[in-house]
């Protein structure tokens, strides 16, 4: 980054801006910042409702009255000038908005104002559009945009990167496959996630179909991944145990990890030319695996059928709502990944990586967003030294991995 831009960034009012702070995940992210980031951090909480922001600020003050408290910024997302005035005063923007409503507006503002950006956007048709339109623009502007940095994709991408790197360091072998296991995770729904799931009807059938292809976000296109389970959707791994292809987010995680693979290809951090990612849930028995797979099929069917989709919209959490925070706080999660070497040997070398956290999924998302923003703020040592673009959590690299 040239010295003029660097000096302009150093003089900004806020180190971190939490945009969408009063939502379920936004509040948890703000809480994580209070509990874990430096006490002299200059930051702001932003959203549409001044009263909700004031309530949140009061709660944050009670958590740690001695630290520097966040400023309050009321933002209307349909007013680009007002949004831009807040974004340009911030070094890093954590965007936790309803992405299908305001995601593109926020992203464009960050690029235009030279502000680093991180989100949990899980809507692949929309993310594909943003990647196609803004990757090169952000790359040329030297602005890092980190997408899908939450529990439903961040650990998957980061563990794939770590396992592939460990395999290369241990055996000098490239990776043919990363086998990912959701080992412990009780996933509750929050309103923002539900809103994103239900928003798929905003896109045409062709866009939705293409969004489920393994390489949809990858600049390098390949054929479909190989079949990796039996006819019951099960797989037995010698290290991870019995696995079921019943993860609801497997398709979006695979698209994200394959994007990382492509962006690192032909570098010293590349995974290998034949790489593919496969994601599963660890199950206790064949019956457990079949039940989970049937549940996934029924849920996807309900989301694709108009009347049942509308019914789900009525009964599932609304934006701002989510699982009981205190119960989530003591709900442990664990993910595991195996990188398998690209060799014809029956005893192909393997490398193992894992991630666990004592709190639940949305606390983990808060961890990833807050610590990811801190990595961009304090280190900004992106993998492969990329200056910017539409990137993935793995590009936060060693600084993020060691947090």
Image (cartoon, rainbow, N blue to C red):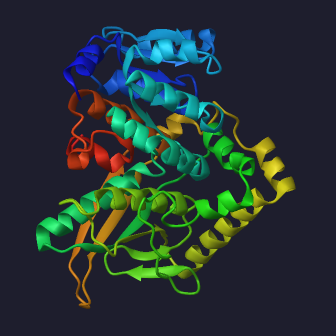
Left or right of 197? Residue 81 is left
For residue 37, side relative to residue 129 (left or right): left
- Quadrant position of the N terminus in the picture: top left
Of residues 171 and 296, the one nearer the viewer is 171
Look at the picture and state if 13 lies above or below 275.
Answer: above
Can see residue 339?
A: yes
Q: Residue at x 56, y 68 (%)?
A: 246
Question: Percent from the top left, x then y, of residue 387?
Answer: 27, 39
The answer to which quarter of the image holds residue 300 is bottom right
180 or 73: nearer the eye? 73
Residue 95, horizontal then vertical, whole percent: 49, 30
In the displayed structure, 134 sits above or below 48; it is below
Q: Which residue is pictured at 20% across the width and 79% down the height?
A: 349
303 or 266: nearer the eye? 266
Question: Looking at the image, which residue is at 63% across and 30% down?
Answer: 320
Give the quadrant of the C terminus.
top left
Residue 68 point in image, percent of width and height: 32, 9
């Amino acid at each position: 980054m040239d010295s003029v831009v660097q000096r302009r960034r150093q003089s900004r009012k806020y180190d971190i801006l939490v945009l969408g702070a009063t939502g379920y995940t936004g509040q948890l992210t703000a809480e994580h910042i209070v509990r874990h980031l430096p006490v002299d951090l200059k930051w702001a909480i932003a959203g549409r409702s001044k009263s909700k922001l004031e309530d949140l600020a009061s709660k944050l003050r009670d958590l740690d009255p001695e630290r520097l408290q966040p400023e309050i910024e009321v933002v209307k997302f349909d007013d680009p000038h007002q949004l831009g005035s807040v974004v340009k005063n911030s070094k890093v923007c954590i965007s936790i908005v309803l992405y299908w409503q305001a995601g593109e507006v926020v992203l464009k503002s960050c690029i235009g104002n030279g502000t680093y950006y991180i989100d949990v956007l899980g809507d692949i048709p929309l993310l594909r559009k943003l990647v196609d339109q803004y990757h090169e623009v952000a790359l040329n502007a030297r602005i890092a945009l980190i997408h899908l940095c939450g529990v439903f994709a961040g650990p998957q991408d980061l563990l794939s990167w770590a396992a592939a790197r460990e395999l290369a360091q241990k055996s000098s072998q490239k990776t043919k496959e990363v086998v990912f296991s959701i080992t412990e995770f009780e996933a509750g729904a929050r309103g923002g996630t539900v809103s994103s799931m239900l928003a798929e009807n905003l896109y045409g059938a062709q866009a939705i179909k293409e969004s489920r292809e393994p390489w949809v976000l990858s600049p390098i296109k390949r054929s479909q991944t190989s079949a990796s389970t039996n006819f019951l959707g099960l797989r037995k791994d010698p290290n991870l145990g019995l696995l079921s292809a019943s993860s609801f987010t497997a398709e979006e995680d695979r698209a994200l990890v394959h994007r990382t693979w492509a962006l690192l290809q032909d570098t010293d951090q590349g995974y290998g030319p034949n790489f593919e990612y496969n994601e599963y849930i660890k199950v206790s028995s064949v019956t457990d695996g079949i039940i989970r797979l049937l549940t996934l099929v029924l849920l996807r069917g309900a989301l694709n059928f108009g009347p049942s989709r509308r019914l789900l919209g009525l009964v599932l959490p609304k934006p701002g709502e989510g699982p009981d925070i205190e119960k989530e706080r003591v709900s442990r999660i664990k993910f595991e990944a195996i990188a398998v070497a690209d060799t014809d040997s029956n005893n192909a070398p393997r490398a193992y990586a894992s991630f666990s956290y004592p709190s639940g999924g949305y606390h983990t998302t808060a961890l990833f967003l807050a610590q990811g923003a801190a990595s961009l703020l304090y280190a900004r040592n992106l993998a492969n030294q990329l200056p910017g673009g539409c990137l993935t959590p793995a590009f936060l690299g060693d600084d993020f991995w060691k947090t």
